[in-house]
Amino acid sequence: MTIEKKSKPSKELPLGFVDRKEKELLIRDFIISNIKEVMIKYGFQYLETPSFEYSDSIGKFLPDKDRPDAGVFSFKDENKWLSLRYDLTAPLARYVAKNYLEIPKPFKRYQLGTVWRNEKPGPGRFREFLQFDADFVGTKSLQADAELCVMISEILEKCGLSKSDFVIKISSRKITEELFKRLNVSNSQQKLTTLRALDKIDRLGWEGVKQLLGEGRKDKSGDFTKGANLTPENVEFIEKELKKKSPESDDLIGILKIFKDYNFSNFEFDPSIIRGLEYYTGIIFEVNLKFEVKNNKGQVIQFGSIGGGGRYDNLVNNFGNYDAPATGISIGLDRLVYALIQKKDFKIKQSKPIVICILDKNFMKEYINLQKLLREAGISVEIYPAESKLKKQMEYANKIKSPAVILYGEDEIKLDKPTLRNLSTGKEKSIQIKELVNEIKKII
RNA sequence: GCAGCAGUAGCUCAGUUGGUUAGAGCACUAGUUUGUGGAACUAGGGGUCGGUGGUUCGAAUCCACCCUGCUGUACCA
């Protein structure tokens, strides 16, 4: 006799992928409905592009590799590499280039879609997540950049955040460009390292950033990061320049004026905002939450921004001959949900069904009629979906957080008066069928 | 990727200087006069002690490598 060892399929999920439960999904749906409402008011078109694109359509930033899987998920279909999109901006640029002659100029579109990144996940950060993007393509007007900031604020407020819960940080790539010119820094590697260091001011403070601008920095775990190797004089100069409270570049002065016209004030000028590196060409901004976010162990964690964006005037041009300056914003919805779930005062109403218990299978027809009556009145209701003792049925109703059960057995049917048991109080009431809908509405 | 810490039932953990069939609480299942949940009691199921290899008469416990998770750091189009 041989003992067969069957290897069972794994119940674990791939790294960075998660199951999402009802509470999270309902909050997400709530956010999405607010987004759609605001986007319609602002006059954006709804667009959907496929999950997969040809790798070279989204991969011009990818390193040359046999398998282009650094950062993205790819596979070879026939002879072509396909990749799951890692954002919604590259597909937009591709779409605009492909449909340039058809679309209105400027083109305003918004999109909600899942994106995938093959990188290390963190708290509220997965390898598959839902992103919201809104973009203006084909305009250089600062009005567009300004409106994106006003618009995202309106969405967040609709979602239940107050002005003090978040802030739009704003800057311009022109500031750092000017800085490099004045310091005579032309080594691109040095520029890159400098920008990356400056991007970390909110986390590391000036203390840490100055180390990174100079020789380098050792982190809490003892790991050492090499710095940009700027001279101490240059580091001093950068700090002095970036600590200036008011912007000097023309685009920032311009957008601040527009903010004033909009009566929009929930922003901060912050020259340390850097965002993506090769990509942006002008105004850049970031949406930052100001309340504490904890992980599931209760530790306060560095959450960072829930999204941001800015002006990218050259991206569409990469796909063809069309010159289409653009500006856009991306928000990670899962990160927003993760943060929102933690705000204690944030509640989503989940309507759970009334449970009609099966006291006697011979009365199924009566139960079905009762169920129909309640459903027609718009009440969430179900007949207990199995065959068990009443005790099990009660336990089930309790477990799914049903507000009440209906007991409708021989005695009740004779009198035509079902018993309604309120599950939070435990009280039972004998009710005429025509009063049932009203009684239930009092409970739920 | 780099660094630090961690990995024992679904969850939270205990497990003494390596020593019989590896434990608890919660959860789960079944019952405690079968028309009554959230409390109590009784019984039960469930673990190749993250994986592989090694040391040993003997490993959850020691060693090596790998995997996964957390935190920081790097990267993030």
Image: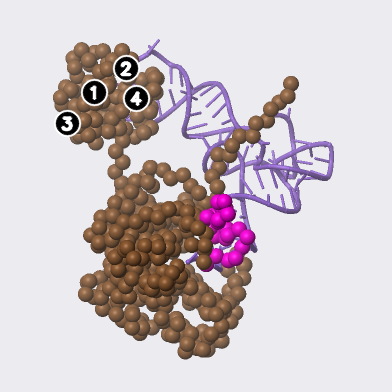
Chain colours: A brown, B purple
Specify few, some or many for label 3: CA neighbours under 10 Å numbering under 14, 14-19, or 20 or more. Answer: few
Query: Does mark 2 fall on the same chain as mark 3?
Result: yes
Residue drawn where x is 55% and y is 51% of the image: A77
| Mark sitting earlier along the chain (4/2) | 2
What residue sits right under mark 3 in the picture?
A: A438
How would you classify the magenta stretch by its main secondary structure? loop
Disc 1: which chain? A
Give left or right: position of B76 versus A378.
right
Residue drawn where x is 55% and y is 56% of the image: A81
What residue sits right under mark 1 in the picture?
A: A370
Mark 1 touching mark 3, by CB under 8 A?
Answer: no
Quarter occupied by the C terminus of chain A: top left
Q: Nearer the viewer, residue A291 or A34?
A: A34
Query: Does mark 2 fall on the same chain as mark 1?
Result: yes
Question: Residue A323 appears at what percent x and percent y?
Answer: 38, 73
Tell me the quarter of the picture where residue B75 sits. bottom right
| Mark sitting earlier along the chain (1/2) | 2
First to last magenta residue range: A61-82
| Mark sitting earlier along the chain (1/4) | 1
Disc 4: which chain? A
Distance from disc 1 to disc 3, alpha carbons, whole Å, reads 14 Å
Question: Residue A418 appears at what percent x and percent y?
Answer: 22, 20
What residue sits right under mark 4 in the picture?
A: A384
Give left or right: position of B17 versus A318.
right
What residue sits right under mark 2 in the picture?
A: A359
Q: Is mark 3 on a helix, strand or loop?
A: helix
Distance from disc 1 to disc 4, alpha carbons, whole Å, reads 13 Å
Query: Does mark 2 fall on the same chain as mark 4?
Result: yes
